Image (cartoon, helix red, strand yellow):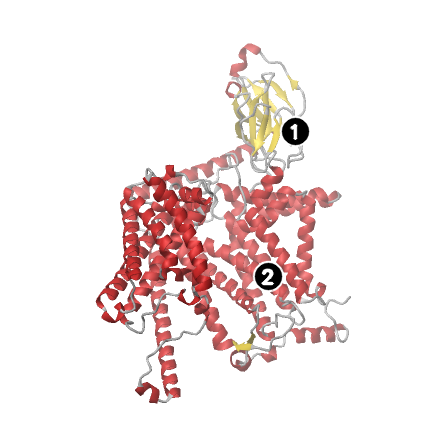
Amino acid sequence: MFDAFFYVGLPYMALIALVVGTAYRAHKLRFTNSALTSQFLESRQLVWGTVAWHVGIIIVLAGHAVAILLPGLWRALTANYVFLVTVEVIGMAAAILALGGLSVLLVRRVISANLQSVTSVMDFVVLGLLLFQVLLGLGVAVAHRWGAVWSTQTVTPYLWSLVTLQPDLSYVTPMPPMMKFHLIAAWVIILLIPFTRLVHIFFFPVGYLMRVPQKVVWVTRRRFEQNVTVRQAEESRRYFLRTAFGLGGAGVLLSLGVFDKLVRFFSGPVMAADEETELLRKKLNRLEQAAKERHLELERLRSEYIHVANLAELSPTEGKYFIDYQMRAALAFRGADGMPLLISAKCTHLGCTVASTMDNQGRILCPCHISYFDVKTGQPNAGSPAKTPLPHIGWVLMDAAGTLMASQRPGGRVEGAVDATKLQEYRVYIAKQFGDLA
Amino acid sequence: MAIIPLRSGGWQGLREALADRMPIEKISFKTLIQKKEVPVHRAAWAYYLGGLVLFCFLIQLVTGVLLLFYYQPTVSDAHASVEYITKYVSGGALIRNLHTWAASAMIFFVLCHLLTTFAMKAFEKPREITWISGVLLLLITFSFGFTGYLLPWHQIAVNATKVGLQSIEEAGRYLPGQLSEMPGRVRELIQGEAAVGQATLSRFYAIHVVFLPLAVFGLIGLHLLTVQLHGMSQGVDKVTGKTERFFPFFVLKDFSLWGIVFLIAAVVALCLPFEAFFSYPLFAPYDALGSTPDGIKPEWYFFFIYYPLELLPFWVVMLGQMVVLGVLFAAPWIFKGTSRRTLTTIAAAAAAYLIIITLFGQHIYEFFKGDM
């Protein structure tokens, strides 16, 4: 009952109030849509409060929005540890910034008598509620780490269940109390938006971004009497100098950063002993593998026969990879007649290496563009991207002593006689004499 | 039809035509700095795109040179050296990520630049040289992408390169007699040996770090020189007459845009490895004896040709590609009398195709081939 009210009833109430109330204010009370300015009365603290608050809260809300609207993408991104840490740090920093700004705004309302005359009770309620909400959010982020990840599995589906009008409380009930309060406070704030100054978030003056900066100044007698052109020139010079300093400063910082990175990049890494051994071991492995390939190449240039496997090793369903005379991958199976069945594994479509496991229809799959090849005939399935069959490869069987027992040219018949009792001892070779594939 | 309408025949005419297009005598401090104006109108934002491509290229140049200090182009060491850069070298991950991200950004901006300049009819006489050099630069940019993709020598890269090169050979099926051998020879010429191996890596490396950059330097020089000679194209059918000074106003805005792009690129490179979007283990080194991993795909910027290749008969795609290339090169002459309105419609259609095939190519592919 309690849960149903706070996580289903309240949200719908808040959303309805939000839509109806905002629409009403937009229509009937046009001029109340912005937050009442207090800059005239107190501007020194305001700038520290309002800028910090707005920058902080916009970043935080943007993070919430991405996790809610694009949970799939967000989950994929946060699976990356570096990214996760970065967004969590940015989020917390923004929350602290918002908190600081909000505190300044609250203190300012409390201590300035001037301001109190333009402050309504609702303003205090909003400030207090927001402060409470940001504190809760920060608390959740610290106490239950990696909210960027778990929120996509809990909060996002809960919110979507509300949107699709099939409220699902099972996501909310197991949440820790702090998170529950954070949710409730969020709904209360949304409920209050149309009744308070918060409504200004929907009437963001986009034009402000494009227009020339304007500043409201108190017209005093002195200023009034001063020559306007002189003042304009003064202002524009100040503006120019400030901009130049800003840009110059940014340039210096940027070059310092780049320089620092470059120096360290060139001086190279300082590695721990175990890291160094690990790296060397890896490099040695790779070298050995490269050497192995060179050996294979040399062997193919020199030898008349190359050992593929022992006949006993071959399986009728799981092919064994070997390298043919053209240095291309090939597969060795054992055919139904007990003789070897050698087939090229280089897909006739675009040259990918075909997988080695036979499916229950006796076919092997090229994973690149999904062609199935029948091992017995080499033919691709109808409609596959590959049009020509995988060629078979000729083989030679020798016994342990190296006497040639049987052979098969590609596409030809098995020649020679084998001793069925000694099959297990036989070795399978490919032969240079068979040359090109059939 | 004369390609370039000559006022008089022979050498004299050619000289005159060239003089019209390369009025070098116009260059002076006055014309370039003091007097240069940029038109102001609805589509004026497109004037910044070429600059962004140039900026991305500069990032590529700097980060690329830095990567050269640690990268080793051999089959046994390439992968380990890339891993070394990202894992151990201070700032190495940042520089490599910046290199990959800026590469994508460069392709993105180059395509935007192509479409907008086409829509703005920036190829009109006397800007044919700018346009042709631009099309060549586009091809070079894609070649950068293709050759650079192989260099880390991991499973996906090598197999994708194999597939890409094999499709050259595929063209042989449609050629008669002796000619059908040609594409296969071309492929072997590019990859340097029978299979993709050390020779291929060495060639791609040389092409990527020496040959293509040199070609870009020359062509960018020509491209920028002709842009400076003729100024910005008017860009719209109805000239507004409004302009702004190139220096300092346009330049300042251009540089602030560069600053913003650099900031975004640096932040993204800092916290998001390029591979973060891939679900497969990109970092497995290439194993010549193993099987090809599932679902290998080229980089996103080749999707526009990759998915058609998957779905349509090979000759259709090849023919389409030839036609598009031909149209691109001949655009100044084909669309001579076309209004910018029509050009904009064509460019918008091309943009729609590129966006849809890049974002939803996989869905389209599964829709048509899902039953297999």
Asked which secondary structure carries label 2, the reply is helix
Q: Which residue appears at 66% of the width and 65% of the height?
A: B341
Query: Compared with residue B191, is residue B267 higher up or lower down, i.e. above or below?
Result: below
Residue A63 locus on image (x, y percent)? 38, 52
Image quarter in which the N terminus of chain A is found: top left
Residue furthest to the front: A28
Q: Which mark is residue B114?
A: 2
Tell which of A112 and A342 is nearer to you.
A112
Relative depth, front residue between B26 and A160: A160
Question: Which quarter of the rendering shows the C terminus of chain A?
Answer: top right
Q: Which mark is residue A379?
A: 1
Rendered residue at 58%/28% (across/down): A364
Q: Nearer the viewer, residue A385 or A169?
A: A169
**Residue B220 rendering spot, x and y as whole percentages:** 56, 66
Q: Residues within 10 Å of mark 1 (few under 14, many from 20)?
A: some
The residue type indicated by label 1 comes to Gln
Q: Are marks 1 and 2 in contact (CB under 8 Å)?
A: no
Q: Position of residue A256 (x, y in %)?
A: 33, 65
Q: Amino acid at mark 2?
A: Leu
- Say whether residue B213 is visible: yes
- How far is mark 1 from mark 2, CA to CA? 44 Å
Evaluate whether residue B146 shows in this view. no
Kindly identify which numbered label has been placed on residue A335: none
- Crowd around label 2: few <14 · some 14–19 · many ≥20 (10 Å): many
Is A152 situated above or below A378? Answer: below
In the rendered image, residue A365, in percent from the top left (x then y), is placed at 57, 31
Relative to B115, A161 lies left or right = left
Chain on which label 1 sits: A
Q: Secondary structure at mark 1?
A: loop
